[in-house]
Image (spheres, rainbow, N blue to C red):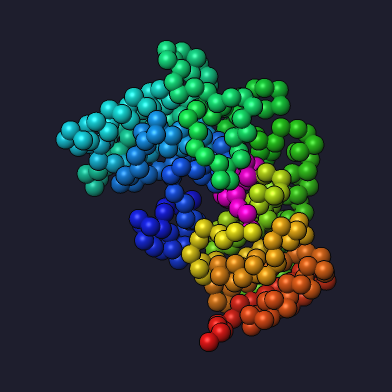
Amino acid sequence: MSFAPKDEHEAQIQFALERGIPATLSVIGTQMLTFPSNAYDMIHCARCRVHWDADGGKPLLELNRILRPGGFFVWSATPVYRDDERDRNVWNSMVALTTSMCWKVVAKTIDSSGIGLVIYQKAVSYSCYEKRKDKDPPLCDPAYKQNISWYAPLIKCLSRLPVDNKGNLQNWPSSWPQRLSSKPPSLVTELDAEIFDEDTKHWSALVSDVYLDGLSIKWSTVQNVMDMNAGYGGFAAALIDLPLWVMNVVPIHTQDTLSVIFDRGLIGIYHDWCESLNTYPRTYDLLHSSFLFRNLTQRCDIIDIAVEMDRVLRPGGYVLVQDTMEIIQKLNPLLRSLHWSTSLYQDQFLVGKKGFWRPK
């Protein structure tokens, strides 16, 4: 998934979304990124101007948090290949910081365009951490809940490696595409695994029997999809054979399942739907919501959520809501007031299509 701040990179993220490439607005600053720990297999920063060693190395320690053990960081930047004093100082700081974090250099080279790059790999065990002389940065406290990354400040410690229910280090997920349906390493109990299997079967049947054939949605026009209440990512997994991608959103007031989603080879973010989403207007073709509103409307107004859905969705795009009739009866008139066309199926599925109308 691509991400960048809107202030420095203008509309690059919007361009990515227009091309049908997963992207979101985000910045490495003072707060954690809205991803779980040990999520990404590889992180790439091209022509990278991030000051990784700032504030005691907190920005790079944040990358270490979201990078899977054994995962790679590809860094393309001037300090890798330029030899002036400023770049040498940055490179020396990077060498000292990555060494203290037990990252090893896999490759350092010049690419075909003449730009230098270096590839680092995160440690897969604690052996290097234990051999460090200064133990700086320290390992995070075992009681620290690493996955709570919503308005959480950056921390100056090495995130602990993920373990299973027996305390053993977790294995790398299965190869693609087997990892999509095999038991995710982050599910630690057999009960969780059973719930995961049932959820996968449920969404496979619902998408094939109802969503693709039984609703008035022209799927050939859909590229950018968002699941507003993603759960284990079953909806996205069921759509995997279609030429589209799904942003899986795990609301902060629900069970934290985002690690499972990344283990499956899917992507997603944390979000509070009582706030605006970090994306440009009119960037999604379809928004999907399964029983999102019941608990959410105890914290904020359904009108505000409907307006945000209208902001994010392209004209001609769809909203597919599965919920109780009580919620549907509240949401349907709001969408119609925006001149959307709506239809109801089986008393639990509301399909709305956004028009081109705007108030004068």
Query: Does the magenta portion include 266?
Result: yes
Of all residues, the one furthest to the left in this rendering is 84
Residue lying at 75% horizontally and 38% vertically, measured from the top left = 193
Q: Residue at x 49, y 37 (%)?
A: 154
Q: How many marks?
A: 0
Question: Residue 353 appears in which quarter of the rendering?
Answer: bottom right
Q: Nearer the viewer, residue 347 or 113?
A: 347
Magenta stretch holds residue 12: no
User: Horizontal placement of 26 versus 226: left or right?
Assistant: left
The answer to whether residue 181 is visible is no
Residue sitting at x 32%, y 35%: 118
Q: Nearer the viewer, residue 130 or 146?
A: 146
- In this orientation, which residue lies closer to the viewer: 294 or 108? 294
In the rendered view, would you say 130 is above or below 242? above
Judge whether 286 appears above or below 87 on screen. Answer: below
Q: Residue 92: name its quadrant.
A: top left
Location of residue 294 in the rendering, given as x and y in whole percent from the top left corner: 77, 60
Rendered residue at 56%/59% (across/down): 277
> Residue 319, image x and y in percent?
65, 70
Magenta-highlighted residues: 258-273
